[in-house]
Amino acid sequence: MDNASIAEGWGRWLDEHAARLLLFARQQCRLSADAEDLLQEALVETWGRTGGDRIPPLPLVYATIRRRAIDRARSDDRRHSREASTAPDRDAWFDVHPADAEFSAHLEALVKTLPAIQAEVIVLKMWGGLTFAEIAEALHVSQNTAASRYRYGIEALRAQFKEVAP
Amino acid sequence: MNNDDQDFAARLQRLRPAAPAPALLARLKAIAEPANVAPRPRRISAWRLAVPLAAAAALVVAAFWLRPAPGPETDALAVETLARPAGALPWTDCLLGARELGIYHGPDGQPYRIVQGVGVGTERWRDPVDGSERTRTVPQQKLLLVSMASL
């Protein structure tokens, strides 16, 4: 396969998956600007690990985003606490009809209050395009663990969610 | 999950993740541009390792098998280590000379003279096949400690 075909295939793959990958990166990070850098770094790494001529598997990309986010959080804790108080994040997680804007904003806020281990499973299952088996692979947990975290997370979200009148 | 949770989950699934900004998407797509692809790490073929290793192993084996055979023992100071053959008759020692090497102070604090004795030993035995007497004379060396307390 020549370089042009490889680049074209990569572009099509990104057209399909970039949004969900960015959502996961945003869930893993505190600031959207960090999420974009994180996503780019993770894609560079996974592209390189697959030899630069094959589309990387989605679970691998998600696992790489997560690992890099954890590394970033460990090294940048002080910077985040300063910036979070001065630069409110305004990049919405979802593209929604204006009528659903409040619902999605409310949902986004509630997901951020969930334990991280539940929030990441919900994001991967709901919008990440992964099965529980793939989620288990990406997060290095058992399938049962992934399913339980998802179930408890959904229960917690629904219990806290207050319907917003359309 | 109960029905309420399932309905709630279905509503969540109808949401669509926000698309990345065009500038970000362009940066991500550029990752696959040939100029941005890092060179593949050079993989060393197993054959390229196996050939020199095999050659080195062959040299070691050849050096071992082609080493010169040990020659006959001619050292006059060869230590008495020969195993006596079966059916041996009493060994005969003949001390030809002795020399003093030094003084040794033992753990008891007493001095001992270190004496090296050089001689020959002859052993005789009966050949198990025809019963004839066989002899063998070999040089010997012994180190003796002679107490100086009696001097």
Image: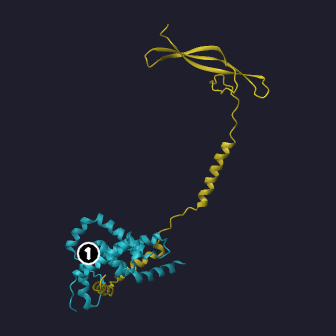
Quadrant where the N terminus of chain B sits is bottom left
Furthest toward the right, the residue is: B130
Task: Residue B149: give x, y in percent of width and height.
Answer: 47, 10
Q: Position of residue B72 (x, y in %)?
A: 70, 29
Q: Position of residue A156 (x, y in %)?
A: 25, 78
Q: Which residue is mark 1?
A: A114
At horizontal 25% and vertical 91% (from top left) the residue drawn is A99
Query: Relative to A129, is A142 above or below?
Result: above
Residue shown at 63%/13% (left/top)? B97
Q: Is residue A43 visible?
A: no
Say which element carries label 1: loop
Q: Is residue A109 above or below residue B52?
A: below
Q: Is residue B72 left or right of residue A59?
A: right
Residue visible at 44% across and 81% down?
Answer: A13
- Look at chain B in the picture and name its colour: yellow
The chain drawn in cyan is: A
Furthest residue in direction top, as rendered: B151
Q: Amino acid at mark 1?
A: Leu
Q: How far from the left and from the top, in percent, is residue A137?
A: 41, 72
Question: Who is closer to the viewer here, A54 or A63?
Answer: A63
Subunit that carries the residue with mark 1: A
